[in-house]
Structures are given as structure tokens and as C-alpha cells.
Image (tube, grey):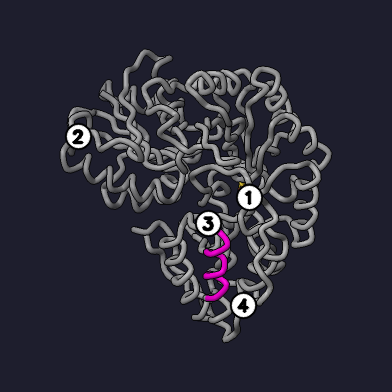
């Protein structure tokens, strides 16, 4: 039998299971899928499985996936374990050398994964590791019936209510090549459209299962703006009460500014946008393709359209000075954005995974350490030790105060950051320009 495991996907019902299940179903192959973020480790299925697939689309998922692989090895040493997804491919050397994986796939993986399963089940040899797969696939409708129901997953929260949120992807990969992004070593500036009919059929089945809001999980919804608008129009026409959110880069907010009023009218409640830093140096180092002044313009475009923004940050990088961190807090404070920024964002520290595009140009940098393979990233130390100390302290606040009152959390982070600089935080009261709280999901975005 075949066992598919997912570990963590930001609180969404995992497409990394629903899509392979659909491809297997089309081929007449049965499989059991378990989302370990909700369900316990399936001991008896793992014992019987001939093929175990482990999804690793992000860092946290891989960490949990490695634990799952160790458990599978312990109780069923003969099972073939295939890791798939971005982080699987980036960390392939570690996964193979530790004996955790027998094969690895990344990119457009579902059809190759099916071929791999068929080969193992019939005793044929399989490819251990392939280059990222960039072949266009024809997509069946994701198969969600055997997965935990939407009430178990992230909810859309607004005006004191929380309703189940569905999750779809209208495209995969990304047109852009920001240097810190784990998508880049795999997709290298390419993206693939999911046909409108497939996306709508997936939305339809999730609405039937209780979804009252849809998250478009594309790395950037406006990589294909015409496609995105067509889907948003189709969604509105069929489900007039449904709201949605999507991720979009600052550059795209500016380039497609004329589309935002229509997106708002079609039901766009909020967007997640990677602002990253208020330092032009850091933005340039990350290759973001936007400036701080572009961030201001993006805020205005979204405010005029009536779409809330959830800005995300890489708060700590080797190039971020203490003055930059304080400037970021000041920028957020002055724009009344405190309730829009999830606490975890103040503690995000640059991750440099193996194969990162940042490695080549920083190989001689004094701050860059050795590969910490078991933690799937390169070690680095800030040239100013106060920043590493501040990161530790802010991470603790994020952990302890988490989803507490955003103003209280922000005040505590300000106290720590200004204190690190021997100063006291600004005396002006913290602004909360948004009552009630802006719309968001119950599970916050982070990478
Ligand atoms: S950070 Fe966003 S825009 Fe940049 S490459 Fe990654 S997904 Fe694309």
C-alpha cells in the first residue's frame, strides 16, 4: 500500500496530499493520506506501507517530516520513502546521507510521483533524485474527501466571527527570483497556471464542505494577472458572498494598481505582501525589486481600493542594523499598521537553505557560517551581536505573548529594541487606526 504524509502547511487542508491523491485515484491506485498536523502518526499503515511519500513544502514541514521518516524506518525499514517539495530538494544531500529518503522530487511532482510509486510497487528500479521537474501537467480535481474537514483548519476571522477557510492554488512557481526565496532554486523564474475549471471545481467542493472564504496560496497571485482576474470573476459570479485573500508582491501592487478596485469588488478582503524591510540596502540584497517608497505607494493603492494588507518582514538579516529594526517599528507605528502585523513577523530571521541564491555572492562574508545540515540551513551571525540578542528576546515575546493584544505585544518589542540601543520608546500613544481588527486567518503566514 501507499501512505502519503503531510506535516504542516500553515493550517490549510494540504493540497500536497489532495493532489497526489487525485493523480493516484485517476490511475486506479489506492492510498492512505494522513495530515500529521491534525492526526496522530498512523502506526499500522506505516508498518504495512510499501511506499511512503512525505511532503516538505516548507522548513517546518521538513523538520516534522524527518521525525516521521525516522518513525517509518524504525517500524518498517523496507518501505521506500520519497520526500517531495521545495525543502526536500534543497536538502536532498542530508536526507539521502542520513538514510531518511530513498528518492526525492521537486517542482511539478504529481505525475512523476505516481510513476515512482508504480515502479516501486511493481519492483522496478526508480530514479533516486531528479532535477526539479518543470513539465506541464494536466491536473485532476484535488481529492479532499478523505482528509480532515475544513473546521479542523485555519479560519477566516473578521468582525468578531470566524468561518472555515478553503485553500486553492491558481498557479505554482514564480516569475521572480528574489535571492532569499526557496522557490527560486527549484522554479528559477518559471510558473505554471492551473486551469480555471480545475481551480473553480476545487473551490466548489470546498464551499460545499463549509468554506466561506478562500485563500489563494499561489506564491504570487498576480504572476498571471489575467488568469487571476478571470478566476476572481468566476468565483464572484458563482459565490457572491465568498471573500478571498491572496499573496502579492509590492512590485505587482504598483504594476497592476488598476486591478485592485475590481479585485475588492469581487471579494478580496486582504492581501499578504512581503514588504521585508525599510532598509534600501536590505531590499537590494534580497533582490526584492521594490523600494521603501514603493511600499508607501502600495499601501495607498490598497487603502483606496479598501483591501486590508498583512505586510510580512524579514526582520533580521546580516545587513539589518539596529537602526533599521527601529526604523521598521517606527514605520509600522506611524502608519497605524500594528494590528496588521502578526507578532511572529517581528522575529523572522533570514533562513539560508542549501542551494540558496544568497550563497554564491556571500561566500566570503564574515557573518556566514557552515551548513547546519540537520537544521536545513546555513548558520550565520550578525556582525553586531546586539541584533542576535534582540532576535532571541523578540522570539521569546512572540512565543509567550503570541496572539495577545497587538498593541501590548508591540509595546514590549519596542521596549526591548529601544532598550538595546540605550533609549526609551517614543512616548506618543500607539495608534490603532483599525477598529474592528483587520481581517485575517487564524493561522499566520510565515516561511
Ligand atoms: S519572494 Fe515572492 S516574488 Fe520573490 S521569488 Fe519568492 S514567491 Fe516570487
Find out if the beta carbon at label 2 lies less than 8 Å from the nearest ligand 1 atom: no
Disc 4 versus disc 3: distance between alpha carbons?
36 Å
Q: Could you tell me if residue 129 is visible in this image? A: yes
Q: Which residue is rendered at x = 46% and y = 28% of the image? A: 110
The circle drawn on residue 356 is 3
Q: Position of residue 362 (x, y in %)?
A: 56, 68
Earlier along the polypeptide chain: callout 3 or callout 2?
2
Please identify the residue farthest to the left as the structure is shown.
Answer: 75
Q: Is residue 237 left or right of residue 170?
A: right
Q: What residue would you read off at disc 4?
A: 425
Tag 3 secondary structure: loop
Mark whose residue sits in front, 1 or 2: 1
Foreground: 433 or 137? 433
Bin the neighbour count of mark 3 within 10 Å (Cα to Cα): few under 14, some 14-19, many 20 and up: many
Q: Earlier in the sequence, mark 1 or mark 2?
A: 2
Label 1: which residue? 310
Disc 2 to disc 4: CB gap under 8 Å:
no
Query: Residue, x 69% and y 27% (percent of image)?
Result: 232
Amino acid at each position: 500500500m501507499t501512505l502519503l504524509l503531510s506535516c504542516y502547511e500553515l493550517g490549510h487542508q494540504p493540497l500536497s496530499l489532495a493532489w497526489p491523491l487525485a493523480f493516484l485515484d485517476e490511475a486506479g491506485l489506492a492510498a492512505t493520506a494522513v495530515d500529521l498536523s491534525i492526526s496522530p502518526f498512523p502506526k499500522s499503515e506505516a508498518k504495512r506501507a510499501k511506499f511512503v511519500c512525505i511532503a516538505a513544502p516548507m522548513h517546518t514541514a521538513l523538520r516534522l517530516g524527518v521525525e516521521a521518516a525516522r518513525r517509518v524506518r524504525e517500524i518498517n525499514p523496507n518501505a521506500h520513502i520519497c520526500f517531495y517539495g521545495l525543502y526536500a530538494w534543497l536538502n536532498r544531500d542530508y536526507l539521502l546521507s542520513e538514510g531518511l529518503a530513498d528518492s526525492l522530487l521537486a517542482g511539478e511532482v504529481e505525475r512523476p510521483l505516481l510513476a515512482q510509486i508504480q515502479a516501486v510497487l511493481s519492483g522496478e528500479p526508480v530514479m533516486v533524485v531528479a532535477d526539479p521537474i518543470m513539465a506541464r501537467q494536466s491536473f485532476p480535481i484535488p481529492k479532499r474527501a478523505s482528509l480532515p474537514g475544513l473546521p479542523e483548519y485555519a479560519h477566516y476571522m473578521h468582525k468578531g466571527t470566524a468561518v472555515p477557510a478553503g485553500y486553492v492554488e491558481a498557479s505554482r512557481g514564480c516569475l521572480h527570483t528574489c535571492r532569499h526565496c526557496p522557490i527560486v532554486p527549484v522554479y528559477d523564474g518559471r510558473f505554471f497556471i492551473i486551469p480555471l475549471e480545475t481551480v473553480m471545481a476545487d473551490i466548489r467542493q470546498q464551499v460545499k464542505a463549509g468554506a466561506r472564504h478562500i485563500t489563494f496560496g499561489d506564491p504570487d497571485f498576480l504572476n498571471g494577472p489575467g488568469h487571476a482576474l478571470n478566476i476572481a470573476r468566476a468565483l464572484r459570479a458563482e459565490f457572491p458572498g465568498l471573500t478571498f485573500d491572496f499573496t502579492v508582491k509590492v512590485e505587482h501592487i504598483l504594476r497592476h494598481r488598476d486591478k485592485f478596485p475590481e479585485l475588492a469588488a469581487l471579494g478580496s478582503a486582504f492581501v499578504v505582501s512581503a514588504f521585508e524591510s525599510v532598509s534600501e540596502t536590505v531590499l537590494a540584497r534580497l533582490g526584492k525589486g521594490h523600494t521603501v517608497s514603493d511600499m508607501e505607494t502600495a499601501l495607498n493603492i490598497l487603502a483606496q481600493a479598501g483591501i486590508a494588507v498583512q505586510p510580512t518582514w524579514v526582520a533580521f538579516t546580516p545587513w539589518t542594523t539596529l537602526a533599521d529594526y527601529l526604523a521598521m517599528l517606527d514605520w509600522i507605528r506611524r502608519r497605524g499598521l500594528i494590528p496588521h502585523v502578526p507578532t511572529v513577523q517581528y522575529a523572522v530571521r533570514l533562513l539560508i537553505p542549501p542551494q540558496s541564491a544568497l550563497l554564491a555572492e556571500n561566500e566570503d562574508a564574515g557573518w556566514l557560517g557552515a551548513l547546519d545540515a540537520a537544521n536545513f540551513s546555513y548558520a550565520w551571525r550578525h556582525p553586531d551581536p546586539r541584533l542576535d540578542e534582540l532576535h532571541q528576546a523578540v522570539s521569546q515575546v512572540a512565543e509567550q505573548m503570541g496572539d495577545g493584544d497587538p498593541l501590548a505585544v508591540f509595546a514590549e518589542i519596542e521596549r526591548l529594541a529601544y532598550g538595546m540601543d540605550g533609549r526609551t520608546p517614543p512616548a506618543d500613544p500607539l495608534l490603532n487606526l483599525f477598529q474592528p481588527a483587520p481581517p485575517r486567518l487564524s493561522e499566520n503566514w510565515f516561511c
